[in-house]
């Protein structure tokens, strides 16, 4: 973030200056008292399990120059920046009061974003947002200085914090947008003001917050409605719900896919033993180029993510060979189809772990099991699956559906974690799965038992919703290496 005057913050957040000098400039805004840097403003957010106002004093002790607080906060005689009473009295301590600190964060970020005349990309979809974002940043980064959202900073807090990281050195930015309610995508897109928007896919996730998948589709469609005539929208040609939105586009449309004819298409897919995925990339228009791409990440879903990244990058007029180099050099985020080769002390050869523990829903589970099915392995295939959460009333049936799917990919061992996944195991057994089946209550218990079962050359897929802590299973295995 470049320096921002307190009076700019006041105007953007519609706040009142209770203490300090409005002409003072601050180098950043922090919401974490543990990591606030000297001279920054500390913004006190309220969460379900915490209240940032309880940490205002700590933020000042760590060097914060000021604080943005809500109306109901009682201002204490805090001493900032230098820790001298005289300095505090001279105006170096700044207190800004606002009606709502979350809204203030968003308003400040929106105002700050307007300072930068650079192209911004926003990515949404049920699955693939973070991986697509990482791929786009890897491609554009070969020619431009790119700001990339950290991790899954895609919500009402993460998006404004990412915008506040913009600096004059950046030439482009790539963000992702998630949702838990109607209206969120529209609001966050208006903050970002992107030139390019992408919808990766629309699937059955967050049904705890939506009536059905059609309501999920309407929420994703908010991106289409928010983009203007001068903007570009990139859509998945193979996803019927996504492609239905193409009729409502006001600006330029670019498509990607595997099954249907699209502007950017993949064919001749091959899953390599080392966990990479090879395919032929072809373009519909212009020269009709064809190029072999070798992704450093496995899975059918990641071909779609790569195609989306290619389509986005094409709007920057990058050479296709440069795009290929970016794709092949990108490093996936942890816990997203992360391939780990591991040597265990008691085994003579390595095992392979596919760490896809970041989250799970029916569509991403289907993709992960499809990968396990297609992989060429020397040993056994082991599927370790945890509960898929936030599916509401549809949760049990969704797990039965995955149970039937497991049978078709025939793992040698199926391990389930959680009460809902027990239903998955029952369905797989009912459908005639020939492999061994084990059910556990939690991931730690499952990890300990799995460690005893492993043999040389096993390939182990581990996947489940974030709250299931499936990464703890992998931690158990890593501790034995």
Image (spheres, helix red, strand yellow):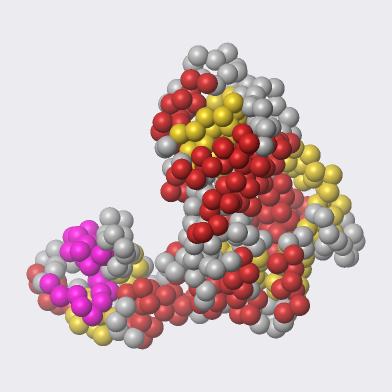
Front residue of 91 and 122: 122
Number of marks drawn: 0
Residue 442 in the image, given as x and y percentages of width and height: 42, 37
Residue 31 in the image, given as x and y percentages of width and height: 33, 64
* Residue 115 against residue 341 in the figure, above or below: below
Which residue does the image show at 82% across and 62% down from the upper left? 262
Quarter of the rendering containing residue 63 = bottom left
Which residue does the image show at 63% across and 21% down from the upper left? 457
Front residue of 389 and 370: 389
- Would residue 42 appear left or right of 341 to someone viewing this image? left
* Residue 347 against residue 212 in the figure, above or below: above
Residue 150 in the image, given as x and y percentages of width and height: 49, 56
Residue 143 in the image, given as x and y percentages of width and height: 66, 58
Magenta range? 51-76
Which residue does the image show at 59% across and 51% down from the upper left? 398
Quarter of the rendering containing residue 211 = bottom right
Q: Assign the N terminus to one quadrant of the image.
A: bottom left
- Does the magenta segment cover residue 48? no
């Amino acid at each position: 973030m470049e320096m921002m005057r307190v009076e700019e913050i006041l105007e953007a957040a519609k706040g009142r200056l209770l203490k300090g000098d409005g002409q003072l400039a601050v180098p950043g805004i922090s919401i974490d008292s543990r990591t606030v840097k000297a001279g920054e403003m500390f913004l006190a957010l309220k969460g379900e399990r915490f209240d940032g106002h309880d940490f205002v004093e700590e933020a000042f002790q760590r060097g914060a120059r000021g604080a943005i607080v809500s109306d109901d906060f009682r201002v204490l005689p805090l001493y900032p920046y230098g820790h001298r009473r005289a300095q505090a009295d001279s105006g170096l301590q700044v207190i800004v009061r606002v009606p709502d600190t979350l809204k203030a964060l968003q308003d400040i970020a929106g105002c700050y974003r307007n300072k930068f005349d650079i192209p911004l990309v926003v990515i949404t979809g049920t699955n693939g947002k973070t991986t697509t974002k990482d791929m786009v940043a890897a491609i554009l980064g070969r020619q431009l200085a790119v700001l990339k959202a950290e991790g899954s900073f895609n919500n009402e807090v993460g998006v404004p914090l990412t915008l506040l990281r913009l600096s004059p050195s950046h030439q482009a930015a790539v963000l992702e947008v998630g949702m838990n309610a109607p209206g969120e995508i529209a609001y966050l897109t208006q903050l970002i003001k992107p030139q390019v928007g992408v919808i990766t896919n629309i699937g059955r996730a967050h049904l705890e917050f939506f009536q059905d998948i059609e309501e999920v589709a309407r929420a994703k469609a908010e991106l289409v409605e928010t983009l203007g005539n001068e903007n570009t929208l990139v859509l998945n040609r193979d996803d019927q719900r996504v492609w239905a939105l193409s009729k409502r586009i006001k600006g330029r449309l670019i498509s990607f896919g595997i099954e249907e004819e699209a502007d950017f298409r993949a064919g001749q897919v091959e899953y390599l033993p080392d966990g990479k995925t090879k395919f032929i990339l072809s373009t519909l228009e212009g020269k009709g180029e064809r190029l072999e791409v070798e992704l450093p990440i496995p899975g059918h879903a990641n071909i779609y993510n790569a195609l989306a990244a290619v389509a986005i990058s094409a709007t920057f007029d990058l050479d296709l060979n440069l795009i290929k180099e970016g794709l092949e050099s990108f490093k996936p985020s942890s816990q997203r189809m992360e391939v780990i080769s591991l040597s265990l002390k008691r085994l003579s050869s390595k095992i392979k772990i596919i760490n896809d523990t970041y989250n799970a829903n029916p569509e991403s589970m289907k993709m992960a099991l499809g990968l396990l099915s297609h992989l060429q392995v020397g040993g056994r295939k082991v599927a370790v699956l945890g509960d898929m959460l936030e599916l509401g009333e549809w949760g049990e049936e969704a797990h039965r559906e995955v149970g039937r799917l497991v049978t078709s990919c025939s793992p040698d061992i199926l391990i389930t974690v959680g009460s809902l996944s027990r239903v998955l195991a029952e369905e797989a057994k009912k459908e005639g799965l020939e492999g061994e089946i084990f059910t556990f209550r939690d991931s730690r218990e499952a990890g300990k038992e799995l460690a005893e079962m492993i043999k040389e050359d096993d390939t182990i897929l581990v996947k489940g919703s974030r709250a299931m802590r499936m990464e703890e299973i992998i931690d158990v295995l890593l501790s034995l290496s």
